[in-house]
Amino acid sequence: MTLTGMKKHVGVLEQAGLVTTEKVGRVRTCKLGVRGLQEEAAWIERYRQLWSARFDELDNVVEELKRKSDREVVVTRTVNAPARLVFEAWTKAELFRRWWVPKSYGLTLLSCEMDVRVGGRYSLVFQHQDSTMEFFGTYVEVIPDSRLVWTNEEGESGMTVTTVTFEEKAGKTLVIVHDLYPSKEAVDSGSAGAMTETLDQLDELLASL
């Protein structure tokens, strides 16, 4: 910065009352003005308090959401297929049985019955080692290519509700799987972690269709 430029900047600060200058011989000294930065500091403090209060409110909202989400698990995945085809993979038994069971679980799907309509029932019977187990429930909302909602009624601790939505964009589909469990304990003891592997298998199936 040139000397002339510096003098102009100092002059502006002097006019604002932020600095005072004193020249002794060839030395010019700048000092913080009488007014200083009191107004600016006061302005900053007002907004600091304002934003501090707002962030405190945000923290409260986040904590409340955390408490509400203790019973919820949400998994999202974008798959490379149109919503129509993805919806069929969720609602046609011959397709559903090819990808739904996580391979790492060592389960064999013995039967898959799906009556996909509002009020319709589904039943999935698995074999694991020397025993069998059944997952079953009722479809409560069916909107083709867009939304599925069903109950999971096999749990002893209460009913879980699963909602799946399908949103197509540019030939791909955003799949959102939302499980609402009856309690936090049910979440902890459930198989929510399997959904990532399950959706990987859905990707593989869609690529083959």
Image (cartoon, grey):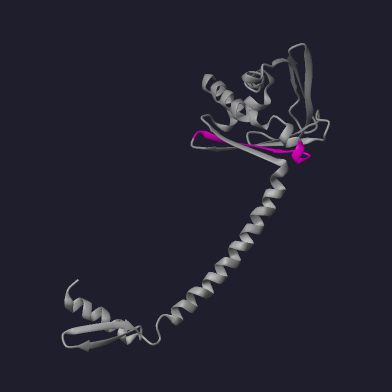
Q: Is residue 157 left or right of residue 112?
A: right
Report the quarter where the C terminus lies: top right
Residue 130: x, y in percent?
A: 77, 11
Report the quarter where the N terminus lies: bottom left
Residue 26 part of the magenta segment? no
Residue at the extreme top: 130
Between 159 and 28, which is closer to the camera in this rendering? 28
Q: In the displayed structure, would residue 108 be above or below residue 166?
A: above
Q: Give the residues in magenta.
A: 171-185
The image quadrant of residue 40 is bottom left
Q: Is residue 121 visible?
A: no
Q: Is residue 75 left or right of residue 40?
A: right
Q: Is residue 137 visible?
A: yes
The image quadrant of residue 82 is top right
| Residue at 50% over, 33% down | 171
| Residue at 57% over, 66% down | 52
| Residue at 64% over, 31% down | 193
Residue 180 part of the magenta segment? yes
